[in-house]
């Protein structure tokens, strides 16, 4: 039995990833802050867990809290014997103003959740993978964004955070040389999630206007992104070590 940790697991891409990994035979610790007020709730997380019975263990915790991530990893190893996969999918969105008008609090929140949250997840998960029975089968995957490649207007802080996620992954992959554990990032485009709707609201446009900036000319489905993540988590996914998978439907960026 393989075991995974998924953050941001209560809805959107995170929830779809939990569903897909369970379908692939993994047991999953599904972690989410369940903070509400525009973010997922405990009811959302419970719905995910309820779909899968004993194969999913829900944990309410914030990725800004390193100790909570350590506890979640320890639970997985103690109860299920190992940690083989970690998917850092927790994120928030803030923006709507030029960089010089963006409140410092927005930058702090995006950095702490979107970048340091990935760092904390890796720092908690990777030692357990290295100490496990089969490091060569272990995978760390971070959810980045098309914003990790493109500059999106009025989203400079979000851009910076997602570029940092890619930097974290590349540095982690270099640190893991020779261990068998691999790390990569997946960068989704405009995906049918609450975050996409929040982004459209920041721009005061319809969601369809955002999706027209990708060659596929539609919103991606969270299950499509989850399928890409699941491949990265698989034994075959080792070939993507240190890479960024652009699961963005041909996103070309958008500006003012």
Image: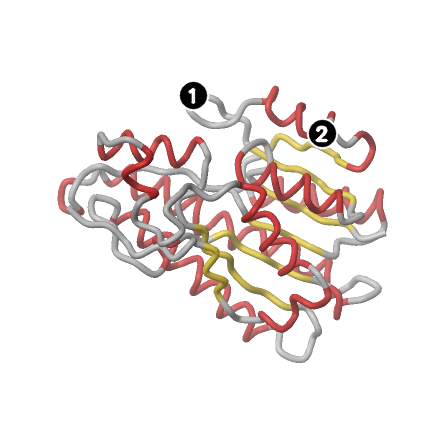
Relative horizontal placement of residue 208, taking residue 11 as reference (left or right): left
Model colouring:
secondary structure
Query: Which image quadrant for residue 78?
Result: top right
Placement of 56 over or under 214, stated as above or below: above
Q: How many marks?
A: 2
Relative horizontal placement of residue 94, taking residue 249 as reference (left or right): left
Q: Name the residue rendered at 77%, 63% in the picture.
A: 131
Q: Nearer the viewer, residue 213 or 12?
A: 213
Q: Which residue is mark 1?
A: 37
- Residue 241 at x, y percent in the picture: 58, 71
Query: Which image quadrant for residue 108?
Result: top left
Relative horizontal placement of residue 43, taking residue 151 as reference (left or right): right
Dots 1 and 2: beta carbons under 8 Å?
Answer: no
Q: Earlier in the sequence, mark 1 or mark 2?
A: 1
Dot 1: within a 10 Å radius of its alpha carbon, few (fewer than 14), some, or many (20 or more) residues?
Answer: few
Q: Secondary structure at mark 2?
A: helix
Q: What mark, if any, has residue 49 been given in the picture?
A: 2
Placement of 178 over or under 244, stated as above or below: below
Placement of 160 over or under 106, stated as above or below: below
Q: Secondary structure at mark 1?
A: loop
- Residue 86 at x, y percent in the picture: 65, 52
Q: Name the residue rendered at 66%, 41% in the picture.
A: 18
- The alpha-carbon separation of the residues under discs 1 and 2 comes to 21 Å
Q: Nearer the viewer, residue 181 or 127?
A: 181
Relative horizontal placement of residue 1, taking residue 156 as reference (left or right): right
């Amino acid at each position: 039995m393989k075991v995974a940790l998924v953050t941001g697991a209560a809805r959107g891409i995170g929830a779809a990833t939990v569903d897909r990994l369970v379908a692939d035979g993994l047991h999953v610790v599904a972690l989410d802050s369940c903070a509400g007020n525009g973010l997922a709730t405990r009811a959302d997380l419970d719905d995910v867990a309820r779909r899968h019975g004993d194969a999913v263990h829900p944990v309410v915790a914030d990725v800004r809290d390193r100790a909570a991530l350590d506890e979640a990893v320890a639970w997985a190893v103690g109860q299920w014997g190992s940690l083989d996969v970690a998917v850092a999918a927790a994120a928030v969105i803030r923006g709507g103003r030029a960089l010089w008008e963006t409140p410092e609090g927005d930058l702090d929140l995006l950095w702490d959740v979107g970048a340091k949250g990935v760092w904390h997840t890796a720092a908690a998960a990777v030692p357990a993978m290295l100490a496990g029975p089969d490091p060569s089968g272990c995978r760390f995957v971070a959810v980045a964004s098309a914003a990790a490649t493109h500059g999106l207007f009025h989203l400079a802080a979000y851009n910076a955070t997602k570029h940092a996620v890619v930097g974290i992954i590349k540095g982690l992959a270099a640190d893991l040389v020779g261990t068998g554990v691999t790390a990569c990032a997946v960068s989704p485009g405009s995906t049918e999630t609450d975050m996409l709707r929040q982004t459209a609201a920041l721009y005061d446009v319809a969601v369809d206007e955002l999706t027209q900036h990708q060659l596929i000319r539609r919103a991606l489905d969270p299950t499509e992104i989850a399928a890409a993540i699941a491949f990265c988590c698989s034994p075959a996914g080792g070939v993507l070590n240190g890479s960024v998978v652009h699961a963005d439907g041909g996103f070309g960026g958008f500006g003012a």
